[in-house]
């Protein structure tokens, strides 16, 4: 299986996990935190394998850091509400 | 002698004349793959949508119950399906990039065609949701939630439409550089959606 196809299967699995969580009826922090983490993981896979940042680990770390801050800010605002 | 500056992340602007950019498909080069301007666009779009989503969540603090009620009118199942549609379309576009690099023009076009069609599926599902909201008398002025959700998802849908046009164009050009650039735009659309979906539809 090629790297791109493995990435696609990961993205399907992570999306399915988000759907299961949302359908489970959990709310608040129990929903927000895992769903945002799954979203960050999907973004990482897209950057690493679809956009080929695996070839440029320094850039991948930079994007991951920026996304981590963004998702932490999402989580903070979601949990305060 | 090795120049110490080369150990830092570097940027490749690609070769002239539609050739594959240096480093593409050659493993860990440390260079930013593809077109520099596409990466500038990707960063810009992430910043714009990131700011929009942060503003959405900040305004939500003023009326959490109103936002939750408004969110219940959206098509969550359709939006979840659209995530699968976009990541699958992105997979086909990524495979098309590899086909372009190995000179398989027929294969790259066979891959890009369903990638573009899946973009159309995304827009149909999105249009269905909008039509349903409009039928309920809901518009951008109904509630702050809808002002943001229409703005963010509508702007994203416009990018999907632009991406479909771009993928069609690069499929016709069929050069490695063109296909990689078009696919990078498409992956950016995918990237924005995986961040937008949980914030607007799930939280």
Image: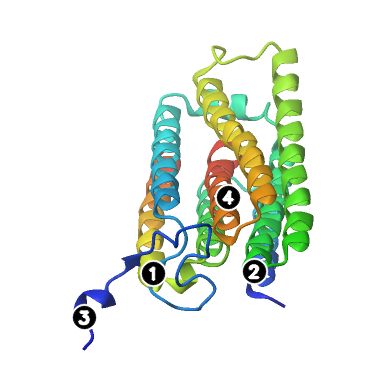
Q: Are marks 1 and 3 on the same chain?
A: yes
Whether residue B203 is visible here, answered yes or no, is no
Answer above or below: position of B154 versus A59. above
Numbered tag placed on residue B182 in the rendering: 4
The kind of secondary structure element at disc 3 is loop
Q: Chain of mark 2?
A: A
Q: CA distance from mark 1 to mark 2?
A: 19 Å
Output the chain of dot 1: B
User: Disc 4 to disc 3, how far (Cα)?
Assistant: 33 Å
On screen, residue A46 versus residue A15, left or right, reads left
Question: Which of pointers 1 and 2 indicates the residue nearer the eye?
Answer: 1
Give the label on residue B3, or none.
3
User: Which chain hosts label 3?
Assistant: B
Q: Residue at x 42, y 52 (%)?
A: B39
Residue B130 picture location, percent across and down: 69, 23
- State the SS at label 1: strand
> Sequence-wise, which precedes: disc 1 or disc 3?
3
Q: Earlier in the sequence, mark 1 or mark 4?
A: 1
């Amino acid at each position: 299986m090629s790297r791109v196809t493995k990435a696609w299967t990961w993205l399907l699995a992570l999306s399915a996990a988000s759907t299961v969580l949302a359908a489970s009826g959990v709310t608040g922090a129990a929903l927000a935190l895992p769903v945002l983490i799954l979203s960050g993981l999907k973004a990482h896979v897209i950057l690493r394998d679809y956009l080929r940042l695996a070839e440029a680990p320094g850039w991948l770390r930079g994007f991951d850091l920026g996304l981590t801050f963004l998702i932490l800010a999402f989580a903070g605002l979601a949990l305060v509400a | 002698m090795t120049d110490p500056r080369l150990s830092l992340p570097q940027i490749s602007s690609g070769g002239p004349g539609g050739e594959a950019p240096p480093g593409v498909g050659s493993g860990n080069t440390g260079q930013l793959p593809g077109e520099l301007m596409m990466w500038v666009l990707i960063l810009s779009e992430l910043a714009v949508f990131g700011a929009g989503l942060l503003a959405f969540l900040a305004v939500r603090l003023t009326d959490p119950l109103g936002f939750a009620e408004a969110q219940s009118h959206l098509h969550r199942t359709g939006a979840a399906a659209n995530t699968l549609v976009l990541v699958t379309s992105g997979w086909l576009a990524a495979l098309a990039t590899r086909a372009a690099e190995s000179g398989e023009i027929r294969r790259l076009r066979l891959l890009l065609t369903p990638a573009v069609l899946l973009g159309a599926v995304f827009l149909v599902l999105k249009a269905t949701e909008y039509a349903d909201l409009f039928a309920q008398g809901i518009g951008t002025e109904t509630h702050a939630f809808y002002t943001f959700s229409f703005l963010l998802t509508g702007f994203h849908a416009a990018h999907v439409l632009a991406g479909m046009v771009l993928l069609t164009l690069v499929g016709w050009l069929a050069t490695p550089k063109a296909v990689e650039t078009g696919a990078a735009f498409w992956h950016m659309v995918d990237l924005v959606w995986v961040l937008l979906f949980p914030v607007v539809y799930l939280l």
